[in-house]
Image (cartoon, rainbow, N blue to C red):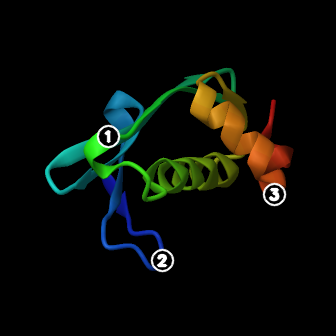
Amino acid sequence: MASVTPPGLAYEVEHDLAHHRFQARIQGYLALLDYQIQRRRMVITHTEVPEAIGGRGIAGELTKVALRYARDKQLKVVPKCAYAEQFFERHAEYQDLLA
């Protein structure tokens, strides 16, 4: 499992390649972003941050790390969960990744 610490954050985002998931453990809670790879596309299927640690931008950081991975691997992205769809609407800098 690979680990990435986003700049300025007190937690690490882990990339669990075997389970197609980016995740972060914060105060004992697990926040996650699940994806599938289909024909050179990263399909983001689920993003979840427990309510107890919500409102801190964690879902956004998980998404940014996932999108950096997609860009590095030259994958296009299909946002299939509501959060990922909204993220793309708010962040024009990632539009080039949309499939």
Relative vertical location of residue 77 with respect to residue 67 in this rendering, above or below: above
The image quadrant of residue 81 is: top right
Is residue 40 toward the left or the right of residue 5 in the image? right
Instruction: Between residue 8 and residue 78, name the one nearer to us.
Output: 8
The residue type indicated by label 3 comes to: Glu
Disc 2 designates what residue? 7
Relative vertical location of residue 40 with respect to residue 53 in this rendering, above or below: above
Measured from the top left, where is residue 29 in percent x and y?
Answer: 20, 45
Label 2's element?
A: loop
Q: Which circle marks residue 72 in the picture?
A: none
Farthest-out residue, bottom: 8
The residue type indicated by label 2 comes to: Pro
Label 1's element?
A: helix
Disc 1 designates what residue? 51
The residue type indicated by label 1 comes to: Glu
- Crowd tier of the residue under label 3, counting other residues whose Cα lies within 10 Å: few below 14, some 14–19, many 20 or above: few
Which numbered disc, 2 or 3, marks the residue that appears first in the sequence?
Answer: 2
Disc 3 designates what residue? 93
Distance from disc 1 to disc 2, alpha carbons, whole Å, reads: 23 Å
Instruction: Between residue 76 and residue 28, name the one nearer to us.
Output: 28
Instruction: Between residue 17 and residue 12, name the one nearer to us.
Output: 12
Distance from disc 2 to disc 3, alpha carbons, whole Å, reads: 18 Å
Identify which residue is drawn at 63% across, 35% down.
Answer: 84
Which numbered disc, 1 or 3, marks the residue that appears first in the sequence?
Answer: 1
Distance from disc 1 to disc 3, alpha carbons, whole Å, reads: 28 Å
Which numbered disc, 1 or 2, marks the residue that appears first in the sequence?
Answer: 2
Identify which residue is drawn at 33% across, 32% down.
Answer: 18
